[in-house]
Amino acid sequence: MNSQDVLAQFEQGFRSAFSLTDEEWQAFVETGVLRYITKGETLFEAGDVVDKVRFVCAGTLCNFYLTPDGTRRNKSFLQRADVSACLSSFSKGLSARFSCEALTDAVCFEVSAKALKVLSEGMPGWKNAFLQMVTALALKKEAREADLLLLSPTELYVQFVETQPELAESLPNYHIASYLGITEVSLSRIRAKLGVQNHYHRA
């Protein structure tokens, strides 16, 4: 798929979710760039001040934390129509505490945080769109925290399979286990208990 087709699909999906005039959309497109990302590429690391906002057009990204002992904890998976950003960097200029990498080849529309702020401050459609995006990120974070505190590992896995079936089938086991906050051995036991016969994805 060429860049024009990617942008056309991105525009169709984005403008169906947010009400923007042609002028507001064109101003946005002119401030950003379509970026092709290779599997395994790091978009930003913990400690960076993240000065870009990326709208996922294709592929899968992963936000993750590294504990002091080097253990990886997957925070979230990002797919088409999701936004890759760090709110603490965006709003306060603070360093990110998590990293982001591409789990597959991916395509994002990338715009600077500064440019997006200017759009949201100067155009009504972007002001509303920005508020909706920030609210959605906050609600997603709240739901994730509640799930980790209130659901058992088995319930978390069942929910993951039901809400993200393609990822449950395609991701390596260690990524799923890390997202659920359990070991790969525990994940295998949960699958066995549920009678799930998944192929063992390692990479």
Image: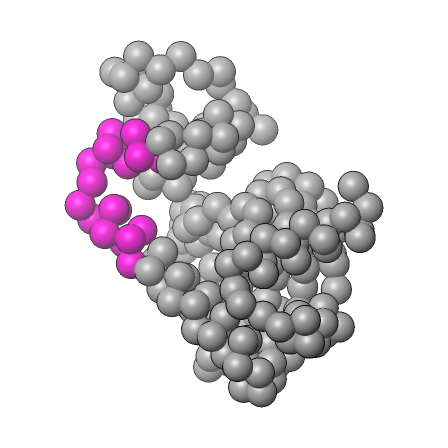
**Residue 170's x, y, as percent?**
53, 28
Q: Place residue 163 in its image quadrant.
A: top left
Q: Is residue 144 magenta?
A: yes
Q: Is residue 40 visible?
A: no
Q: Residue at x 33, y 41 (%)?
A: 181
The residue nearer to you, when weighing 135 against 171, is 135
On screen, residue 18 above or below 78: below
Q: Residue at x 73, y 49 (%)?
A: 6
**Residue 5's x, y, as percent?**
77, 48
Q: Residue at x 64, y 45 (%)?
A: 58
Q: Would residue 32 be found to the left or right of residue 180 on screen?
A: right
* The residue positioned farthest toward the bottom in the image shown: 122
**Residue 190's x, y, as percent?**
28, 22
Q: Would residue 40 be found to the left or right of residue 166 on screen?
A: right
Q: Would residue 119 be found to the left or right of residue 8 on screen?
A: left
Majority secondary structure of the magenta segment? helix
Q: Residue at x 43, y 35 (%)?
A: 164
The residue nearer to you, when weighing 138 against 182, is 138
What is the number of callouts on the image? 0
Tell me the magenta residue range. 142-160
* The residue positioned farthest toward the left in the image shown: 150
Q: Would residue 145 be found to the left or right of residue 69 on screen?
A: left
Q: Quadrant of the C terminus?
A: top right
Q: Place residue 156 in its image quadrant.
A: top left
**Residue 118's x, y, as percent?**
60, 84
Q: Quadrant of the N terminus?
A: top right
Q: Is residue 27 visible?
A: yes
- The color scheme shown is one colour
On screen, residue 13 above or below 28: above
Q: Is residue 22 magenta?
A: no
